[in-house]
Image: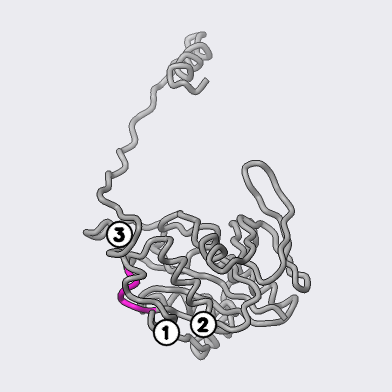
């Protein structure tokens, strides 16, 4: 039996217009949904459960509205959820989030494997799984596109710009997955109805032995002091081929230092 915890996050729909609050944090009220890469992480945890038995718990931190993302994961088939909810969390950076989730994992018994997405679309930091692994002294497998649990070992394929590598580690371990890991299932009507009855354990910072000074924008080690809008697209240079089109294109590429 393998007990898996999946880290999930509610983020603004990346297809919607992004807006920033006065403190330059993302306005998370715009079309919030369960991060897509987290759906794939949940799917992989469910496959491991189906193959090996055990349970799947989803873990997240955020405001009360995050319950919608939690219910989506539960409707896919996760067994239960842990939701760290505290007003002091707002504005936390990646280091603080990693610390918070590390302490929250301590409140979940019998964790064999932690699965996360490789990065979230709201920040694209991609560091939280590594922060947790370092804090807990656990092995981590990153950017995995294939995953198998065999007894006390997790193994699979890691994909990078340099190629594909075979990795394995002893459990307990932390894994981050990329978008090629699987295609997440759609929640069934039965799953949606069952999710309404599943346990969501809500914890405060005090419940996981953290102080308000450990998290939050005011205590973060990083901050955004200003933003600049992306410049509008400009029309490209049109090349008319009068028998010397190839030469003109080559001159343009040389001028841009592309070749």
Earlier in the chain: of badge 1 and badge 2, it is 2
Earlier in the chain: of badge 2 and badge 3, it is 3
Q: Position of residue 218 (x, y in %)?
A: 27, 64
Q: Which stretch appears magenta?
A: 85-90
Residue located at (38% from left, 83% from top): 206
Residue located at (55% from left, 82% from top): 108
Left or right placement of residue 57 versus residue 159 in this view = left
Give the structural element (helix, strand or loop) at label 1. Answer: helix
Earlier in the chain: of badge 3 and badge 1, it is 3
Image: 124 above or below 11: above
Looking at the rendered image, the disc whose residue lies closer to the viewer, 2 or 3, is 2
Residue that mark 2 sits on: 107
Residue located at (51% from left, 8% from top): 243
Q: Which mark is residue 207?
A: 1
- Residues packed near mark 2 inside 10 Å, few (<14), some (14 to 19) or many (20 plus): some
* Depth order, front residue of 220/196: 220
> Dividing the picture into quarters, in which one does residue 121 lie?
bottom left
Q: Are marks 1 and 2 in contact (CB under 8 Å)?
A: yes
Give the structural element (helix, strand or loop) at label 2. Answer: loop
* Disc 1/disc 2 C-alpha distance (Å): 8 Å
Q: Position of residue 195 (x, y in %)?
A: 52, 85
Residue 88 magenta-highlighted: yes
Left or right placement of residue 128 versus residue 51 in this view = left
Residue that mark 3 sits on: 25
* Depth order, front residue of 50/126: 126
Q: Position of residue 117 (x, y in %)?
A: 55, 62
Residue located at (32% from left, 65% from top): 91
């Amino acid at each position: 039996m393998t007990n898996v915890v999946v880290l999930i996050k509610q983020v603004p729909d990346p297809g919607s217009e992004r807006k920033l609050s006065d403190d330059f944090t993302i306005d998370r009220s715009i079309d919030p949904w369960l991060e897509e890469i987290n759906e794939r992480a949940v799917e992989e945890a469910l496959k491991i459960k189906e193959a090996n038995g055990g349970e799947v718990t989803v873990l997240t931190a955020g405001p009360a509205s995050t319950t919608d993302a939690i219910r989506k994961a539960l409707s896919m088939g996760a067994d239960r959820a842990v939701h760290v909810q505290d007003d002091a969390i707002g504005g936390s950076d990646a280091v603080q989030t990693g610390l918070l989730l590390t302490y929250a994992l301590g409140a979940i018994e019998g964790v064999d494997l932690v699965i996360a997405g490789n990065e979230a679309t709201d920040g694209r930091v991609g560091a939280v799984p590594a922060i947790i692994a370092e804090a807990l002294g656990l092995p981590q497998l990153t950017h995995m596109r294939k995953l198998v649990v065999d007894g006390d070992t997790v193994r699979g394929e890691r994909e990078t710009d340099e190629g594909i590598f075979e990795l394995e580690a002893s459990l307990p371990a932390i894994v981050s997955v990329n978008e090629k890991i699987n295609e997440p299932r759609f929640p069934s009507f039965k799953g949606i109805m069952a999710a309404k009855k599943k346990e969501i354990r809500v914890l405060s910072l005090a419940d996981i032995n953290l102080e308000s000074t450990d998290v939050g924008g005011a205590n973060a080690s990083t901050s955004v002091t200003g933003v600049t809008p992306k410049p509008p697209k400009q029309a490209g240079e049109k090349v008319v081929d009068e028998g010397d089109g190839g030469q003109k294109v080559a001159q343009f590429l040389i001028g841009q230092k592309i070749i």
